[in-house]
Amino acid sequence: MGEKSGNCRVPEDLFNGLKVTEPQETECTGHLVSDPKDQHSQNKLLRDDEACSQEDQGEEECFHDCSASFDEEEPGVDKIEKKPDDDVNSSELDEEYLIELEKNMPEEEKQKRREESTKLKEEGNEQFKKGDYIEAESSYSRALETCPSCFQKDRSILFSNRAAARMKQDKKEMAIKDCSKAIQLNPNYIRAILRRAELYEKTDKLDEALEDYKSILEKDPSIHQAREACMRLPKQIEERNERLKEEMLGKLKDLGNLVLRPFGLSTENFQIKQDSSTGSYSINFVQNPNNNR
């Protein structure tokens, strides 16, 4: 019994004296013991592995630092300078944003940019007269990019001119937006309002067109085109509304017949009458509608 107990303790004592190592380290140690002649080279390999491990740790720390630095700089980056770089045409940007962008621009620089935009506008006018509408649109766009936002009247004319160039290219919706910007910058710009009214008519927005024509007459009753449109459009709007109402009633009738068909009925079995004194409606059921005709 005593010998067996002693034998059991021997492995435990040996186990306590062992050093627990990683698998890779164990392999290296076993190799060193099995081949003592190469101990020097194996030690060198171990030192190289430790050096590589330290270099990897250094790279990770450096990457982490760069990331932290980027996160800190992101909120502080001049957002005003980055916005136009996102493939956004400065002529399409909000005017309030442009004012903020040019807040610290020297007055001399503003005047210089205004002169450059005027030259571009003149180039666009010549191109428009020649029928080169694509080139004219491009010139007006570059002029808008150059012209400082403080010169609202100049920018209003540029937007209106570009709208005309876009109209010639059948870019109606884009032209309407340009006219609206021109009117926003100069609410009394009759040519821009008239141009937008024409575009509204061409896109079947008759109610909007009539409002623009009325606005023109309020500003200048001598505009014949606006006066003629104010006489013509109300009837067109009424006819359009009647046509839309008939189309809607036709669709409702088809839907009603679809629902009533399983019961052997149709919308012809129901007659709607209006009381002339009260204006209210009453619905009467007719068993044989064809016999009442």
Image (cartoon, rainbow, N blue to C red):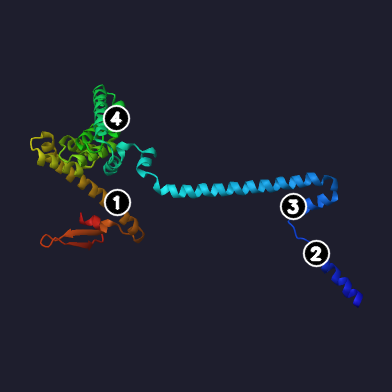
Quadrant (top left, top right, bottom left, bottom right) of the C terminus: bottom left
Give the CA distance from mark 4 to mark 3.
Answer: 71 Å
Q: Which residue is mark 3?
A: 24
Residue located 79% across and 52% down the image: 29
Tag in front: 4 or 1: 4
**Between discs 4 and 1, the one toward the N terminus:** 4
Q: Residues within 10 Å of mark 1 (few under 14, many from 20)?
A: few
Give the CA distance from mark 2 to mark 3.
Answer: 20 Å
Mark number displayed over residue 17: 2
In the depicted structure, whether residue 244 falls above or below residue 259: above
Q: Are marks 4 and 3 in contact (CB under 8 Å)?
A: no
Residue located 84% across and 67% down the image: 11
Residue 207 percent location from the top left of the image: 19, 44
Amino acid type at image mark 3: Gln
Q: Are marks 1 and 2 in contact (CB under 8 Å)?
A: no
Amino acid type at image mark 2: Gly
**Could you tell me if residue 169 is visible in this image?**
no
Give the CA distance from mark 4 to mark 2.
Answer: 88 Å
**Between discs 1 and 2, the one toward the N terminus:** 2
Q: Which residue is mark 4?
A: 137
The residue sitting at the top extreme is 130
In the depicted structure, whether residue 115 falls above or below residue 179: above
**Between discs 4 and 2, the one toward the N terminus:** 2
Q: Which residue is mark 1?
A: 251
